[in-house]
Every structure is written in C-alpha cells, then in structure tokens.
Amino acid sequence: MEKVKGFSANDPRYLGFIELFNQHKFFEAHEILEVLWKEIEGPDLDFLKGLIQIAAAFVHVQKGRFDGAHQLFKTASGYLQKYPSPYKNIGTQNLLSAVEESLISGKGFPKIKLKTTLC
C-alpha cells in the first residue's frame, strides 16, 4: 500500500480517536489511530505517535501500571512538544498539561478538546 503525506483533521479515524479517548476507551482509541498512522508518511507521523502513546499511557493507568504510564507520557510529550498549539485542531500544550495533571493526581482522565478556527 502506498503511503500518503499527512492527514486531514477531518479524517474519520482521527475524529473517532478523539471520541473514543473522551469516552475513556483508550485501547480502542489507540487502535483506530494506529491504522491511520500506518497509512501516512511525513511530519504528521510523530504527532500521531504522541497521541497513540498518550492513549496507551491511560491503558496502563486503567490496568494499574503507573510506571509504564509515566514512561509513555514522557515519550508522548517528546513527540508532541515539537508541534505548534493548536495542531490539527488539538491544543497540544493544553493536552499535555491535562495529561500530566491527571497522571500526577491520579484523579480522572483528561478530555481532548478540539480547537476550531473561524474563517
């Protein structure tokens, strides 16, 4: 299969990832975004890797494996910090802060809030 350059913020798999993530279905969110990640090439790859790693971190949290969650977050943070905020309609810095706060406090799960721009 030939890979395509990047992806649209309106891609149904990307939007599905966000919906599943916000429903705390982190494993499913990880899986759907991995399909998209395998189909693209270019600068969006690390962005998707970061989001996949965040979802995987919360899979670890749900299973009580907090050390693994923190390690995955560190890796995800390294990927996502390279991107402007917002990127593909996600406020990357806000997301990283919310994830870090959730992991430190152990209370609740963050939501991904889409940022849209008006023309």
Image (cartoon, rainbow, N blue to C red):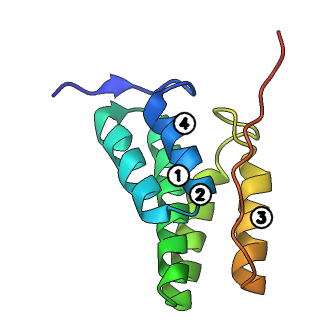
Question: Percent from the top left, x then y, of residue 81?
Answer: 67, 53
Among the two numbered marks 1 and 4 on one chain, the one whose residue lies closer to the N terminus: 4
Among the two numbered marks 2 and 3 on one chain, the one whose residue lies closer to the N terminus: 2
In contact (CB < 8 Å): disc 2 and disc 1: yes
Residues at marks 2 and 1, CA–CA distance in whole angstroms: 5 Å
Residues at marks 4 and 2, CA–CA distance in whole angstroms: 13 Å
Find disc 1 in the rendering and name its residue. 20
Which is nearer the eye, 118 or 97? Answer: 118
Among the two numbered marks 3 and 4 on one chain, the one whose residue lies closer to the N terminus: 4
Secondary structure type for disc 3: helix
- Indicate the quadrant containing the N terminus: top left, top right, bottom left or bottom right: top left
Q: In which quarter of the image is residue 77?
A: bottom right
Q: Is residue 102 above or below residue 17?
A: below
- Indicate the quadrant containing the C terminus: top left, top right, bottom left or bottom right: top right
Find disc 3 in the rendering and name its residue. 98
Q: Quadrant of residue 98?
A: bottom right
Find disc 2 in the rendering and name its residue. 23
- Identity, as a three-letter code, of the amino acid under mark 3: Ala
Residues at marks 3 and 4, CA–CA distance in whole angstroms: 19 Å
| 94 with respect to 4 (left or right) | right
| 74 with respect to 45 (left or right) | right
Find disc 4 in the rendering and name its residue. 15
Q: Residue at x 69, y 33 (%)?
A: 89
- Identity, as a three-letter code, of the amino acid under mark 2: Gln
Secondary structure type for disc 2: loop
- Identity, as a three-letter code, of the amino acid under mark 1: Leu
Question: Percent from the top left, x then y, of residue 78?
Answer: 59, 61
Secondary structure type for disc 1: helix
Q: Residues within 10 Å of mark 3 (few under 14, many from 20)?
A: some
